[in-house]
Image: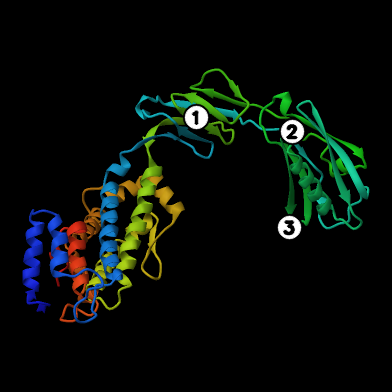
Amino acid sequence: MKIGNNISMYNTYNMFNTLYQGNMLSHSNRLNRNFFPLPGNKAQGTGALGSGAVQFINSIKSSSKALSGTIKELSGPAFSNRAITSSNNDVMTVSYSGNKPGSVSSMNIRIDQTAEGQLNEGTIEAANAAYQGAVGVNKFSVEIGGKTTEISVNVAEGDTNKNVQQKMADAINKAGLGIKATVATDSKTSTSMLSVESTKTGADEKNSFKITDITGDMAAKTGIDKVTREGRDAEYSVNGGPARTSQSNSVYLGNGVTATFLKASEETVTVSRGQDMKYAISQVESLVKSYNDLYVESVQRTNDMKSQNLASKMVSITGTYSNALSSVGIGFDSSGRMTLDSEKLGKAAESGRLEQFFTQNSGRNYGFTNQLSRLADNVQRNTSNYVGGSIFGSGLSENFSYSSFGDLIQYNFLSAGSILDFML
């Protein structure tokens, strides 16, 4: 086949391949300018490589590269990262701000009491019953940190208990006094209750508050003038040592480790160096994304048999290991895209099944990582195996646009490495 002034495809390829073997990069611009006119100076005909085709080539290359990199990471490195961990995240979590986890020694923490703020729980009322307190403007005071603030709430005829409780909560919260009011409802019993709690934990007297009626009986009627729980400090011990206290549930343990107490427990919680499962899980999430990106790109080209073949190979690999994938939280929706069950994934990470699936050196699981990685690498190296003739639109013929093919050569030289990868 010839293009224009007796310039054959063969000669064009030879010129480009010479450039690829090591001649000056600027020659690619000269090739494009001399033999393939700039956009707007097209030869006879209208055929052209569309921007969608170039985008498709670029997408499958980048998606396969991302997929390959993620699989390689999950084949070992992702499970080698170390982090400071808690043996029971339901009781206590830990965070680490240092850069040398290896310097952190194991610690055993016992939490006898968590830190809490003062709480005034009101009385439980029938939510939709008419409010029986004083109608009109009611006033009550809140004393906290040596300062007294007056709060007004207007009660209208026909207001329900829940209406009044919500009006009081809104007024208290709007005042921004360091306390938070909430209305809890129970749909089963149709009841509601107003509660007021300090936003700061600890037994410090500065955080305690007192609520007193001024005009009307609103505070007494709703029950928020009575203290249900005084503020208290957290109580804990480290490595069996003496009891320690903290006004906050966030406690610095030293060496860059900060613990957050969630609840008291008779059992000790161990802080130690362990696998960084958050990182491993993030890599699985990346695997799902890159797999779906490549799969969607290939499967949507319904008229391209080579692209469809890529999608089929992906489905074949994952289908073979569907049961093992499901055991670590990886599934598939009706369109063939990967999905993640975060709860199942987390349990697999904790039990070690996730690491075993991706890193063991023999058996079916290793076969999955090996096959999918090999396919992703092959897409990058031999893209033409997964790109059909339809990629070139109307085809390369006398009607093909000079400028577009020149752009294709230059595009491939700069970003892909060789025009051979896209020759069909």
**Can residue 126 be seen by looking at this rendering?**
no
- Is residue 384 toward the left or the right of residue 191 in the image? left
Residue for badge 1: 258
Q: Residue at x 39, y 25 (%)?
A: 104
Pointer 1 or 2: first along the chain? 2
Q: Residues within 10 Å of mark 1 (few under 14, many from 20)?
A: some
Residue 114 in picture, x, y percent from top left: 61, 31
Pointer 2 or 3: first along the chain? 3
Residue for badge 2: 229
Q: Residue at x 31, y 71 (%)?
A: 299
Q: Which mark is residue 187?
A: 3
Residue nearer the viewer, 367 or 375 = 375
Q: Residues within 10 Å of mark 2 (few under 14, many from 20)?
A: few
Q: Residue at x 16, y 80 (%)?
A: 397
- Is residue 114 toward the left or the right of residue 351 in the image? right
CB-based contact (under 8 Å), mark 2 and mark 3: no
- Is residue 39 toward the left or the right of residue 202 in the image? left
Kind of residue sitting beneath label 2: Arg
Residue 352 in picture, x, y percent from top left: 35, 45
- Compared to residue 183, the image places residue 398 above or below, namely below
Residue 382 in picture, x, y percent from top left: 16, 63
Label 1, label 3: how many angstroms apart (C-alpha)? Answer: 39 Å
Pointer 1 or 3: first along the chain? 3
Kind of residue sitting beneath label 3: Ser
Q: Residue at x 21, y 59 (%)?
A: 380
Q: Nearer the viewer, mark 1 or mark 2?
A: 1
**Can residue 104 be seen by looking at this rendering?**
yes
> Splitting the image into 4 quarters, where does residue 223 fall?
top right
Q: Nearer the viewer, mark 1 or mark 3?
A: 1
